[in-house]
Image (cartoon, rainbow, N blue to C red):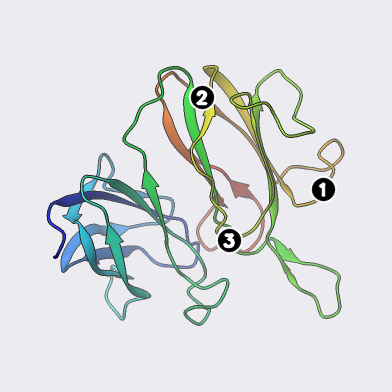
Amino acid sequence: APSTGTARVRVVHVSTNAPAVTVTRAGASLAQGAGFAGVAPATGYATTPAGPATLEIAPAAGGPAVYRNLVSFARDSAYTIVALGNVGFTAGAARSFQPIVLRDTVAVPATGGWLRLVHAVDSLGVNTATPPAVVSAVDIYVYPQGTPRPTAAPAAGAAIRLLNASFRAQTAYTPLTAAGTYVVEVFTAGATPATATPLVNTTVAITNGLKATVIVRRAQVGATAAPLNAPG
């Protein structure tokens, strides 16, 4: 039987070479004119029918869709669609424009916050191999400000260490049990943090009850190299 009821959806646009986009599903708009680094709706979520339906992402100024596929949402659930990748690649290619769909939790942490990570940078450049190959993997550290960067797997709830994260990598919500300011650092995968310059070095405030997503992305539209950014 077809699903009934609705789901809630929001869209985050982090593709540096895609124009502002309009996102529709089941013939209804979820986001109109969503630009790079923007979240649509600006607050809250749009409502869409539960069950399977066609999701389409197209340039807001008009033209053919850059993505079109069947996407299913569960009733009474919330989702974040992260639009990422490179519109210059053939659909289905590893670095092509293709959104990822994250299911947002409806639960709320009692103490501290929950953080999840998304790696949205399709290329950090090329290596010195013959022939050269695109490098995109990163190491991500999230730890309390004023404490040492974790050099081993951290204790549950204390910090986050994600190594060799490939493009499109995503984590589940990870608890950070103490409220406070946390450092977010991103390095090229395999770098020695003590001597390497981070691609990202910023902070995020964890408050009691917070649920947030940190997306590692390019810092500005049209960028093809560093600097990077990691907005919450």
Residue visible at 37% across and 48% down in the picture:
103
Q: Amino acid at mark 2?
A: Ala
Mark 3: secondary structure? loop
Q: Is residue 56 above or below residue 165?
A: below
Q: Are marks 3 and 2 in contact (CB under 8 Å)?
A: no
Q: CA distance from mark 2 to mark 1?
A: 26 Å
* Nearer to me, 90 or 106: 106
Q: Are marks 1 and 3 in contact (CB under 8 Å)?
A: no
Q: Is residue 85 above or below residue 92?
A: above
- Residue 153 percent location from the top left of the image: 73, 34
Query: What residue is pinned by disc 2?
Result: 205
Q: Is residue 84 left or right of residue 7?
A: right
Q: Amino acid at mark 1?
A: Ala
Q: Is residue 37 left or right of residue 177?
A: left
Query: Crowdedness of circle 1 by 10 Å Cα count: few (<14), some, many (20+)?
Result: some
Numbered mark located on residue 223 in the image? 3
Residue visible at 48% across and 20% down in the picture:
112
